Amino acid sequence: DAKTTQPPSMDCAEGRAANLPCNHSTISGNEYVYWYRQIHSQGPQYIIHGLKNNETNEMASLIITEDRKSSTLILPHATLRDTAVYYCIVRRLNNAGNMLTFGGGTRLMVKP
Amino acid sequence: GAGVSQSPRYKVAKRGQDVALRCDPISGHVSLFWYQQALGQGPEFLTYFQNEAQLDKSGLPSDRFFAERPEGSVSTLKIQRTQQEDSAVYLCASSRQGASTDTQYFGPGTRLTVL
C-alpha cells in the first residue's frame, strides 16, 4: 500500500475548521484514502474514506486533489472532543491485505 | 448497539508469564483483526481471521504469539513467556464482511505491561 505523510501535530481553535493534510504521492488507481482517529485511551475510530471524489458525512469532509496525490480532512467546527491523533491510510482494493497500515498520524489539539 | 469489547482492559505480567487477551467482536462480523500499538506509535497489524480461519498471521512478531478464533466469533490472543518488549496496547477490530474496503470497528484495547 502507498505510504502516507502527515504533519506530526497541529493546533486548532475551538469552533474553527480543522484542516488536516495528507500526502500520498505514490497512490495507485485502485487505492482508497481512509481516515481514522484515535482519542486518548480508545481504539481507532473510522471517519471517512474516498477514491477520487470529495466526500462528506456527519463527521467530516474529505477533499482529494485531482491527481490524487494528496488529500485534506476537514472538521468544519472543531470541538474539544475532536482532540485526537488522526491517521490517513491508503488501502488497496483486493482481497489480500485487508489490514490497515497506520503511519504516525497527526496529533490534533483543539484549544478553547 | 454493542461494539467490540476486549478484556481485560489492563494486564500486568511478570516477565516469563503467559497471558491471554480476549476479543468479543460485533455480533455477526465475519472478519477479525489484532493489532499491536507501542507507546507513541500507530497500531501495527498482527493477524487476521475470516470466520474461524486465520488467513494472515504475517504480523505476529514471534512464535510466542498465538491467536485463535475457534467458533468464528470470540478470539483470544495468547502471548507465551512474555518479554518487556511485548508491553503495548493490543487492539482488536472486526468488520462485517471479508471485503478489503469494509470499515473496521475497533475495541478499546488491552494495555499489557510486562515487568
Image: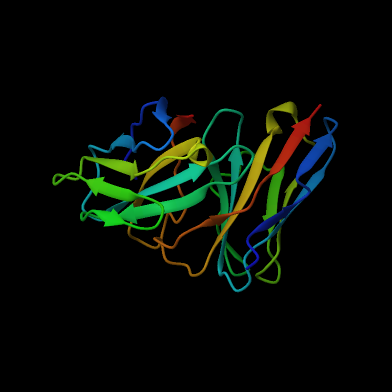
Tell me, yes or no, if residue A108 can be seen here: yes
Residue plotted at (62% across, 47% down): B91
Residue B19 percent coordinates (x, y)? 80, 44
For the N terminus of chain A, the quadrant is top left
Instruction: Pick out the residue farthest to the left.
Output: A66
| B52 or A105, nearer to the observer | A105
| B19 or B93, nearer to the observer | B93
Residue B67 percent coordinates (x, y)? 68, 54
Residue plotted at (44% across, 43% down): A101
Tell me, yes or no, if residue A104 can be seen here: no
Note whether A42 is above or below A12 in the view shown. below
Q: Which scheme is used to colour this image of the protein?
A: rainbow
How many numbered discs sit on the rendered protein? 0
| A87 or B13, nearer to the observer | A87
Question: Going by the image, does B94 lie left or right of B97?
Answer: right
Q: Quadrant of residue B43?
A: top right
Residue plotted at (21% across, 56% down): A53
Residue B84 percent coordinates (x, y)? 74, 27
Residue plotted at (26% across, 42% down): A71
Residue A80 percent coordinates (x, y)? 51, 37
Note whether B111 is above or below A50 in the view shown. above
| B59 or A78, nearer to the observer | A78
Question: Going by the image, does B26 lie left or right of A60?
Answer: right
